[in-house]
Image (cartoon, rainbow, N blue to C red):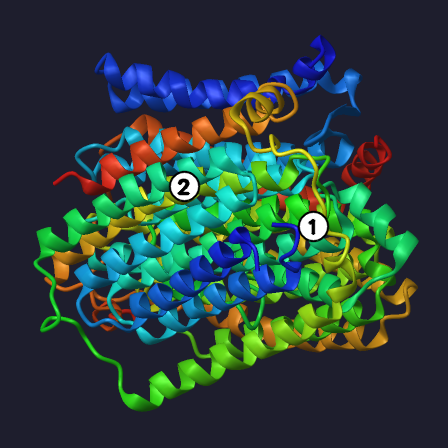
């Protein structure tokens, strides 16, 4: 391995170092606050490291890894989301858990797993990155182990994730048998030479099952609602953003390398999955009274929309990245509000608890409203241009069916998002919840970051051009 | 060894995989379900080693993949056992059907 | 039939038979013991396929460490045939049908791949020796090696955090 290759991996090494630094801080009995602040600066250091190495990209680290523009974009998104999740975690865990410190080790290691997924171009790094992400997630989901729901969610995620990783491995074995290679581009070359066989398609199918599970695509979405509900709110935000971004990144790279878009059968299957996601996600969310479950179903629908961009091939990648950015900011602000409203006993996941929030806390209600409007794709919020770009590439590729379903299901989606918003502005219940004022500094920081996220949403909604140009600039580095 | 056709090895590994799938679907005891998953991972390992040896003997990819699968399975089992023990502490049982409190 | 063929078919029968016993025996302790026998048979397969190091690692890690862990947990929870929950007959039947169908599909697909099975040949017997593996592990595969060490760190922290009172 040469120096330049090591340099390209610098951000990932800094990320791993962050976990070790947290371990050392715990060993020296530092307080939660110290760990939180150090973790924040370590994540900033990762961003700096990425800025530092950007001129050396793209760089291959054979045979397993490649650090290119796509990887840099997705890793940037992941680090951004973790910064916000980390900030939300402080107020959440400080009063719930007697030892909230080890949480940060697991958080950073799971992030490293997702980041490894974005740079992997080989089955071994794909598998190890995915497992690093899942093993850390098992522990994160079950972290509040005294609450039954957390353990139950952990058990469900554990069993299903282990089952799907066995399927993933079997699929990889079949592809290895057919092509003799585990590297994505080599597999692509092998199948352009010899064509696809039944076993190869079966292998792809098994891999799609595993990826579909991680992205909670229909019909592999059964875990999503339970795990979203049972996991601690910041961890749910992490699952909804970081883990899905990482898996989506590796899926994009894999599909590009093996020319998945030229295979009629695969395209048909993915189209059906996309339509099923959009319809099932939106319909299941309609009657939901639990906000966390509702967001789970809504994220199923959103990944259906994202699959439309994915199916458009290379043209759709830019739109997909923009969509993921808008989606992450939106979900992080929504989960930020859920975290702020959660009490010691229970997460604030009942819709009835949000009744009249506007009259109690106008700022929170405003942030939540903007987030929900963005999820619904209303103009002037980030959700609108994001959906618009996807629709544009879909129409350009003549995927009329998908485009029509996307528009129709978005209209269904409007209904339940507006239902929550109307709850926010309804007359408040008799007994207003008491304000918590335990950690004024961190409350201020959390509020500030949520307000920043809200303005980001509006800015992306009004001037999306700047970001989309930058995204395209990154995507050509390959 | 060369006289054994690859398909026979593949049959053994595929059969092991689906015995694992069957076990996972029919058992309710979490520990036994975990054992069924270990069985599936092992069948995949046989696949990788056999493909490596029979089809692409000049590389070591398959053997390495098996090695990594074994390491990952060990790590996964450790966390899984910790979660199952916690479930047992809360419920006094490790029947999956007891872990069904969340409902719509 | 030469000796390696006899060994192969004996080991396969042993692996499949004990694997079936793993999923059907009512007592979890028996399941663990049958699983250990399966692992021995699979290690035998590895050694037949010249992956000696892998065979030994499989025994040490699986039969030696993971299964002992399982046994301890089962004894800790005092599980036996009486406490074992049973699924009803229809679910079992559904399990058999689902597993059997998938198996049939895969076996049928594997049949098509028969062409490739004929090229099986290997002259060198040292492919799975530690020397060769080690060389590649610390050159080509050094990054995943490091990442798997991080994976263990994560598993360790996770198990300790979740497991402690």
Residue furthest to the front in view is C2
In front here: C106 or A382?
C106
Q: Is residue C11 left or right of residue A465?
A: left
Q: Secondary structure at mark 2?
A: helix
Which residue shows up at 23% across the image and 42% down it? C162
What residue sits right under mark 2 in the picture? C58
Vertical placement of residue C11 versus C132, above or below: below
Residue furthest to the top in view is A3
Eye-nearest disc, 1 or 2: 2
Q: Quadrant of the C terminus of chain A?
A: top right
In front here: A68 or A195?
A195
Q: Position of residue A238 (x, y in %)?
A: 46, 45
| Chain assignment, label 1 | A
Q: Secondary structure at mark 1?
A: helix
Q: Is residue A378 visible?
A: no
Which residue shows up at 26% across the image and 30% down it? A439
Vertical placement of residue C72 versus A452, above or below: below
Q: Quadrant of the N terminus of chain A?
A: top right
What residue sits right under mark 1 in the picture? A176
| Chain assignment, label 2 | C
Q: Is residue A382 left or right of residue C87?
A: right
Which residue shows up at 81% across the image and 53% down it? A316
| Numbered circle sitting on residue A324 | none
Vertical placement of residue A233 versus B5, above or below: above
Q: Position of residue A187 (x, y in %)?
A: 79, 47
Identify the image quadrant of residue A184.
Answer: top right
Q: Residues within 10 Å of mark 1 (few under 14, many from 20)?
A: many
Q: Position of residue C159 (x, y in %)?
A: 27, 39
Which residue shows up at 53% across the image and 56% down it? A214
């Amino acid at each position: 391995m040469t120096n330049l290759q090591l340099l390209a991996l610098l951000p990932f090494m800094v990320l791993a170092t962050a976990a070790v630094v947290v371990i050392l801080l715990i060993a020296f009995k530092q307080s939660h606050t110290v760990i939180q602040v150090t973790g924040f600066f370590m994540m900033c250091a990762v961003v700096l490291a990425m800025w530092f190495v950007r001129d050396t990209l793209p760089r291959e680290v054979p045979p397993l890894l490649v650090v290119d523009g796509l990887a840099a974009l997705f890793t940037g998104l992941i680090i951004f989301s973790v910064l916000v999740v980390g900030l939300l975690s402080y107020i959440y865990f400080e009063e719930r858990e007697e030892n909230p410190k080890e949480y940060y080790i697991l958080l950073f290691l799971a992030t490293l797993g997702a980041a490894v997924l974005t740079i992997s171009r080989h089955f071994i790094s794909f598998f190890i990155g995915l497992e690093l992400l899942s093993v850390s997630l098992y522990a994160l989901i079950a972290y509040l182990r005294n609450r039954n729901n957390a353990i139950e969610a952990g058990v469900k995620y554990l069993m299903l994730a282990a089952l799907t990783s066995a399927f993933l491995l079997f699929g990889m074995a079949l592809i290895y048998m057919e092509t003799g290679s585990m590297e994505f581009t080599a597999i692509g070359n092998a199948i352009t030479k010899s064509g696809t066989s039944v076993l190869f398609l079966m292998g792809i199918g098994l891999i799609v099952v595993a990826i579909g599970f991680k992205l909670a695509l229909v019909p592999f979405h059964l875990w999503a609602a339970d795990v979203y509900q049972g996991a601690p709110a910041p961890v749910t935000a992490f699952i909804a953003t970081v883990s899905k971004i990482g898996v989506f990144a590796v899926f994009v790279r894999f599909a590009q390398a093996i020319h998945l878009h030229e295979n009629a059968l695969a395209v048909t299957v993915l189209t059906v999955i996309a339509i099923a996601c959009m319809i099932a996600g939106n319909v299941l969310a309609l009657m939901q009274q639990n906000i966390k479950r509702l967001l789970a179903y809504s994220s199923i629908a959103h990944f259906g929309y994202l699959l439309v961009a994915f199916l458009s091939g290379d043209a759709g990648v830019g739109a997909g990245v923009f969509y993921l950015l808008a989606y992450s900011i939106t979900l992080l602000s929504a989960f930020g509000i859920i975290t702020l409203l959660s009490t010691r006993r229970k997460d604030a996941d009942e819709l009835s608890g949000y009744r009249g929030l506007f009259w109690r806390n106008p700022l929170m209600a405003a942030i939540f409203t903007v987030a929900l409007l963005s999820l619904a794709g209303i103009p002037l919020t980030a959700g609108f241009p994001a959906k618009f770009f996807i629709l544009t590439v879909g129409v350009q590729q003549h995927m009329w069916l998908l485009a029509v379903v996307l528009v129709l299901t978005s209209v269904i989606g409007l209904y339940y998002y507006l239902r929550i918003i109307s709850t926010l502005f309804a007359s408040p219940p008799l007994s207003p919840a008491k304000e918590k004022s335990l950690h004024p500094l961190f409350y201020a920081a959390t509020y500030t970051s949520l307000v920043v996220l809200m303005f980001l949403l509006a800015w992306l909604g009004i001037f999306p051009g700047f970001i989309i140009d930058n995204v395209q600039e990154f995507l050509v580095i390959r | 060894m060369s006289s054994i056709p690859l398909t026979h090895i593949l049959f053994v590994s595929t059969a092991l995989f689906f015995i694992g799938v069957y076990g996972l679907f029919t058992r309710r005891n979490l520990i036994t379900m975990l054992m069924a998953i270990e069985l599936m991972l092992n069948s995949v390992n046989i696949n990788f080693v056999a493909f490596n040896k029979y089809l692409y003997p000049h590389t070591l990819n398959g053997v390495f993949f098996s090695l990594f699968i074994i390491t990952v399975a060990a790590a996964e089992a450790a966390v899984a056992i910790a979660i199952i023990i916690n479930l047992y502490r809360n419920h006094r049982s490790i029947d999956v059907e007891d872990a069904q409190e969340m409902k719509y | 039939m030469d000796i390696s063929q006899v060994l192969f078919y004996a080991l396969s029968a042993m692996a499949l038979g004990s694997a079936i016993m793993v999923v059907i025996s009512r007592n979890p302790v028996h399941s663990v013991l049958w699983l250990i026998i399966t692992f021995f048979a699979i290690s035998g397969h590895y050694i037949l396929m010249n992956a000696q190091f892998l065979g030994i690692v499989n025994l040490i890690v699986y039969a030696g460490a993971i299964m002992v862990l399982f046994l301890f947990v089962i004894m800790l929870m005092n599980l036996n045939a009486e406490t074992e929950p049973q699924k009803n007959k229809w679910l079992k039947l559904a399990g058999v049908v689902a597993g059997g169908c998938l198996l049939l599909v895969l076996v049928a697909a594997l049949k098509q791949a028969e062409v490739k099975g004929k090229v099986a040949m290997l002259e060198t017997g040292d492919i799975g020796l530690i020397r060769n593996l080690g060389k590649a592990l610390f050159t080509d595969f050094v990054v995943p090696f490091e990442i798997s060490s991080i994976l263990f760190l994560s598993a360790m922290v996770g198990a300790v955090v979740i497991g402690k009172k």
